[in-house]
Amino acid sequence: MDARPIPLPLARAAAPERADAVRNRALILSAARRLLAERGVDGLTMDGLAAEAGVGKGTVFRRFGSRNGLMLGLMDEIEADFQARFIGGPPPLGPGADPVERLVAFGRERMALLGVQGDLLRAAENSPELRYASPPRAASAMHVQILLNQAGYDSDPVVLAFTLLASLDATLVLHENRAENLSLERLADGWEDIVRRVTAPRAS
Amino acid sequence: MDARPIPLPLARAAAPERADAVRNRALILSAARRLLAERGVDGLTMDGLAAEAGVGKGTVFRRFGSRNGLMLGLMDEIEADFQARFIGGPPPLGPGADPVERLVAFGRERMALLGVQGDLLRAAENSPELRYASPPRAASAMHVQILLNQAGYDSDPVVLAFTLLASLDATLVLHENRAENLSLERLADGWEDIVRRVTAPRAS
DNA sequence: AGTCTAACCGGACCGTAGTCCGTTTATTCC
DNA sequence: GGAATAAACGGACTACGGTCCGGTTAGACT
């Protein structure tokens, strides 16, 4: 099988950007963080952002493509940190622990992250198109698939990984938590239960 | 108190509507179906719809609340049919079969439905708010919870039902199917595998 | 039938996401 | 340093979802 290392997203590398482009990206991101802090996710408009950053609206769209793209840009740091933790951090999230324990930890940590950064993560997930196509998501999917394999799950890790990740969607978790009044602890316990059952040796 | 009925789909109950309101609702729905057929989901704009139906834009919004509400209205018939089948139709989807078999059939049938009506169902799911609040979804969640209970699942049926339903989201399934090239059969097999594992008697 | 009232209607209006294209500027090559 | 060029810039413009409110009409009551 393909044991190649995970195709690290984060790929900021390649494309040589002009100095002004780099500067404006930074200006826009910091302006966005400022606006988010003081006006909330819904209070962030692309016009307002352009004004706050002191650039033209076209520049904002050139750099980030869309409002969702911007949100993904804002999440980049958060996701990169999370990714670093499950790829190379300390166990049980990082390598060294039993794969099932790592899966359990993965879900628990994700829930905890959603508890803190949920609104932003949800805002970044809203576009149906970009939702499943983002590099952090691909990395998570790959990670979960690998752990499932290591745990001896022998049916269809690709499909199961999608299902498991779907239960960690920011939109879903926030709905369960806020509208259905399910605590994050309960959701995390549910995750653990599912993971253990699914990876348990077959009875038959 | 404003007791005005927010036009929730399926709410066919109480509220006596004026004859003109009823007529316009029908006009709008049929115009919407016409436009969907000839221009696709994205080609359906609220202005265009109002024009096609021969009513004012305000009327469209008064009747359906939002673009998503309209989509839910369009789906109403489809969902009601599906619901009737899993509540009272022939087994294995309907009552009479083993609960696990019914769960398996539920997922398979849903996948099949998505294969046919996927675009419309996805359009109706797009609003983060309405997404999980719609009556058809609540009915599905309840149904799955009950079946899980009957199958002897003793941990947390509420949470597990959310997870399982999440894997049947139109947006997710269409992505898996189209962007990831996973056939609906494979997804359905994955569903079956997960359901069987999760409801299997505990090993320990 | 006539009157009254609440509900309904319609389209002008608003805010926002996203596009377009003429202008400006960083970078490269002499 | 200066010219050439490709990229970046910016703000006017468009399209769409959603709101608002003055005018209209269905239905009830007499």
Image (tube, coloured by chain):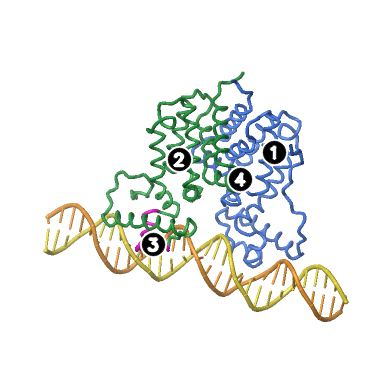
Chain colours: A blue, B green, C yellow, D orange
Q: Which residue is mark 1?
A: A143
Foreground mark, 2 or 4, reads: 4
**Relative to residue B154, is residue B66 depicted above or below?**
below
Q: Which residue is mark 3?
A: B50
Counting residues from the start of the chain, the first of labels 2 and 4 encountered is: 2
Q: Chain of mark 2?
A: B
- Compared with B78, A186 (above or below) is above
Alpha-carbon span between mark 2 and mark 4: 26 Å
Instruction: Give a yes or no on whether discs 1 and 3 share a subunit.
Output: no
Q: CA distance from mark 4 to mark 3?
A: 37 Å
| Residue ID for mark 4 | B181
Residue type at mark 1 is His
> Distance from label 1 to label 3 (Cα)?
48 Å
Q: Quadrant of the C terminus of chain A?
A: top right
SS category of the residue bearing label 2? helix
**Amino acid bearing label 3:** Ala
Secondary structure at numbered mark 4: loop
Do badges 2 and 1 share one subunit? no
Q: Chain of mark 4?
A: B
Closer to the camera in the image, A120 or A152: A152
* Prevailing secondary structure class for the magenta stretch in the rendered image: helix
In the rendered structure, which segment of residues is drawn in magenta? B47-64
Q: Residue at x 41, y 61 (%)?
A: B49
Query: Pointer 4 and pointer 1: residues touching (CB < 8 Å)?
Result: no
Q: Which amino acid lies under the numbered mark 4 shown in the image of this protein?
A: Asn
Question: Are tags 4 and 3 found on a single chain?
Answer: yes
